[in-house]
Amino acid sequence: MSNFSLELEGSDLTFYRDGDVILRGRLTPNSRASIPLVLNEPRGWRIEHEADVEVEDVFDLRTSGHWFGGQELLNQVWPSERAMLADSPFHTSDNGPTGLSCILSPLWVTSSGVAIVADHDQDLGLSLNRSTAEQPAFKWDLGLPAPFDLRPMLEDGTGDGLLRLRGRGLRYRLLAAEDAVQAWRACLPYIGHPATIPPEMLWRKPIWTTWARFKTDIAQQRVIEFADEIITHGYPHGVMEIDDRWQIHYGDVTFDPKLFSDPRAMVDELHERGFAATCWVMPFINPEAKCFEVARARGYLLKQPDDSPLPVRWWQGEGFLLDVANPEALQWFSERLRALQKETGLDGYKFDAGEAIFAHRSNDYTRRYIDFVAANFPFAEVRSGWSNQRAPILFRQWDKSCIWGTDNGLKSLITGAFALSLAGYPFVLPDMVGGNAYGGENANAELMIRWSQANALLPAIQFSLAPWDYGDECDCLCRAALDVRERYLDRIAAALHQAAQTGEPPIRPVWWLAPGDERAQICDDEFLLGDGILVAPVVQPGQRARDVYLPNGEWRGAHTGQMFTGPTVLANVPTPLQTLLVYERA
């Protein structure tokens, strides 16, 4: 067993393993370091500062190898030190101005075997490798204030090489282990993990949603026609999500009778066709809603300091937020959702929003909202998270763009799955195949095919843009990707169940099997499903061959049957448009 030691000289901190430096930092004076735990091999120190004193502790990224963070970013680069994240509140955000997104956890792991995990019940500020040069600052604006590749910006030589944590009475743990995997496992007692897995129908077959294809132009007959198209083209199907806008006014939780003349009949027809049915809901109530006056009179809306309802701007106008800290408000919301299910036969809901940025306060809003969903509506998906790692529900990545890169495109499916996995959210739901077709963007056949392949062995898959709209080849090859998924469903199920038993994420970076290998540490376009399946999708346009890194072990190429011994790099492996590279560990 290695010997770990922590040295404090004044404000300077140095972490050692067997005499080698694995982390350097600078603490605010008068901090306290204690040694409260020894967990198997990892060794931990708890750092605490005086309550109600604003402090900033700083860690040198360059002393610890590569960094892997627990934050979802709009530009999800990997490893984390490649990003320059400007100083900002560490708050869950929808399209955040600095690049922070909807699911966050104050947890960072290094390739040297150090982990930093902060207490979730505090309000934190963060910067990561922030630029020392003059860089543009972006205000939060739902109208996309800047391109995703600028939020956060990529390292350009001006980054300060530091992770800065700030807050009042800042509290966190420094954990050290033999490698990054052991360090991450040492964090599990502090973040927790689900004890069960999501309902099978949410992940065994694709979710289909109306949003990207139809946006708000939906109606009862259109939903049924979409279901029939899916069946006609031979696609497996689990859930039909009826997205915006099935309500007359946001917050009323009732179908618009002009567009949906008989919701019960619609849901019955979906059930007959083999679909479960869900509807899109959110915690906003617009003032036009019939329920608004009731919510205001009973004190169910989030309030300002003067006790008046807090007005918020969201992507569908001016509204108000449900006060999720009020048990009576949550009970009222729950009763209305259950009444709609009883009336129509709906199986569950797609819960949107819940980010702190709308509530103009800490992440406690996110935590309470998602805890409510998990406790009351397990047949669900959510897109925000803070200290909700025990929730056995699907956590969706943020709305993807119809592009290829880590800047909210295809490649960010993989790096985003890593970020959510390391943040402690194992049941990752990537957003819709091909993206959302916002702002005049659209997918093409190649993007749809490669996206379907990259998503095939992730925990869940969701379609909205219809592959058959992009030609016969696209239609055929997207179905072929789902055939690959079908062949590995037992392995996906086993990985999900392992996550519920041990906390180990189903989707893992390849360094999970080779934590000391630099090639594995920087690999951002391959992933592991459990420890036995390695997937190397194509995530660049026009690419018809790619290199594949294989970690230790004997590996069989599923597409050829050829055996390989790792660690090795297979150079220039052919990847024609119909090919997804999958390797099985013997």
Image (tube, rainbow, N blue to C red):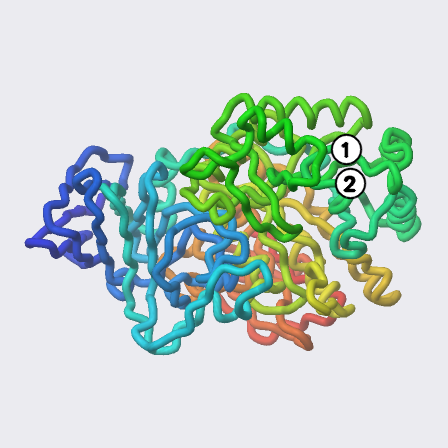
Image coordinates of residue 122 in percent, x first then y, are 33, 40
12 lies left or right of 406 = left
The quadrant holding residue 435 is bottom right
- Against 391, is 339 above or below? above
Residue 422 showing in the rendered view: no
Q: Residues within 10 Å of mark 1 (few under 14, many from 20)?
A: some
Foreground pick, 184 / 241: 241
- Against 556, is 130 above or below? below
Residue identifier under label 1: 254
Foreground pick, 148 / 406: 148
Foreground pick, 170 / 260: 260
- Residue found farthest to the left: 10
The disc label shown at residue 248, or none: 2
What residue is at 33 percent from the left and 67 percent from the top? 130
Question: Which numbered disc, 2 or 1, marks the residue that appears first in the sequence?
Answer: 2
Label 1 near label 2: C-beta < 8 Å?
yes
Amino acid at circle 2: Ile
Image coordinates of residue 129 in percent, x first then y, are 33, 66
What residue is at 57 percent from the left and 64 percent from the top? 144
What residue is at 20 percent from the left and 41 percent from the top? 48
